[in-house]
Amino acid sequence: MLTSLWQRLRADFAMLLAFLGFAALSFVFLKLASEVLEGETMTLDRWIITGLRSADPTVPIGPSWFETMMLDVTAMGGVWGLTLITLFVTGFLIVARKYATAGFVALSVIGGALLGTGLKALFDRPRPDLVPHLVEVSNASFPSGHAMNSAVVFLTLGALLASTHRSRRVRIYLISVAVGLTLAVGFSRVYLGVHWPSDVVAGWCIGAAWAILCWITARLLQRTHQIEQPGAVPVEEEGGPP
């Protein structure tokens, strides 16, 4: 009984911390958005972007292989890259017979993508024009779609997959990989000259806030058995256990 009570208290404390994280990230995004609208971030934005270019503004700092790597990294945060990753993860969950979790994952990612599209249309910030863009872009700049969508997809998938495992090491690994990929994609957008740094930070904040909200929702749904519990193994439909 004491063990069960302790586990419930730990779970409630984790939920409280997650909610505080969601509130903090949402506040930072709103504060940053306000400063962007007032032009207060431009000095730092310009300094960082120009600092990532050599004496020739068409050439980024660092060896040529690093630029190639940044092009590959930024592709992972594009629409097709994130769509394929989402399909692979939902497919895995379906094969594992976690059908409700698979549906929740798909809805979480789609909802985050729609949120990002709406925010871009709302702020309609022009792209940086200080240095040549090293990849083609067409839509508005704030918040960074690659940074936000990467946070939405990688952090949401990492958190939801982690919530299906009881092993602490597995959960830490999944979250660490998700955070690393999110940071790498966001940095690549600034390095390639297609986003102001404030765009990327805002994308990280709102994307991470969305991921936390999805994690909280998933935990509540698990408690009410509307999606699969962590480590739950579905019963075989045919033949039963060997």
Image (cartoon, grey):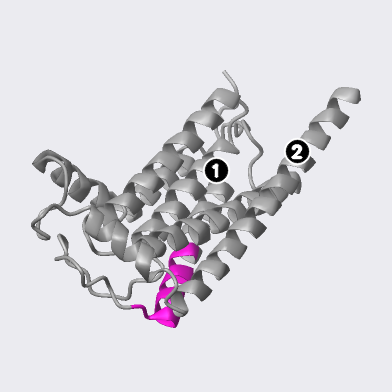
Residue type indicated by callout 1: Ala
Examine the image and state in which quarter residue 241 appears: top right
Assess whether residue 28 is covered by the magenta stretch: no
Instruction: Check disc 2: other Cα within 10 Å, few if <14, some if 14-19, many if 20+.
Output: few
Residue 123 vertical position relative to residue 16 in the rendered view, above or below: below
Q: Position of residue 95 (x, y in %)?
A: 45, 39
Examine the image and state in which quarter residue 43 appears: bottom left
Left or right side of 69 for 205: right
Residue at image mark 1: 159
Left or right side of 18 for 73: left
Q: Label 1 vs label 2: CA separation?
A: 15 Å
Q: Can residue 73 be seen from the camera position used here? A: yes
Q: Quadrant of the N terminus?
A: top right
Left or right side of 94 for 200: left
Residue type indicated by callout 2: Ala
Left or right side of 24 for 125: left
Examine the image and state in which quarter residue 228 appears: top right
Q: Position of residue 33 (x, y in %)?
A: 50, 72
Q: Is label 1 in a helix, a strand or a loop?
A: helix
Of residues 195 and 111, the one nearer the viewer is 195
Of mark 1 and mark 2, the one earlier in the sequence is 2
The residue at 58%/50% (across/down) is 100
Q: How many discs appear?
A: 2
Instruction: Check disc 1: other Cα within 10 Å, few if <14, some if 14-19, many if 20+.
Output: many
The residue at 17%/54% (across/down) is 53
Q: Position of residue 51 (x, y in %)?
A: 24, 54
| Magenta segment | 112-125
Residue at image mark 2: 11
The residue at 30%/65% (across/down) is 46
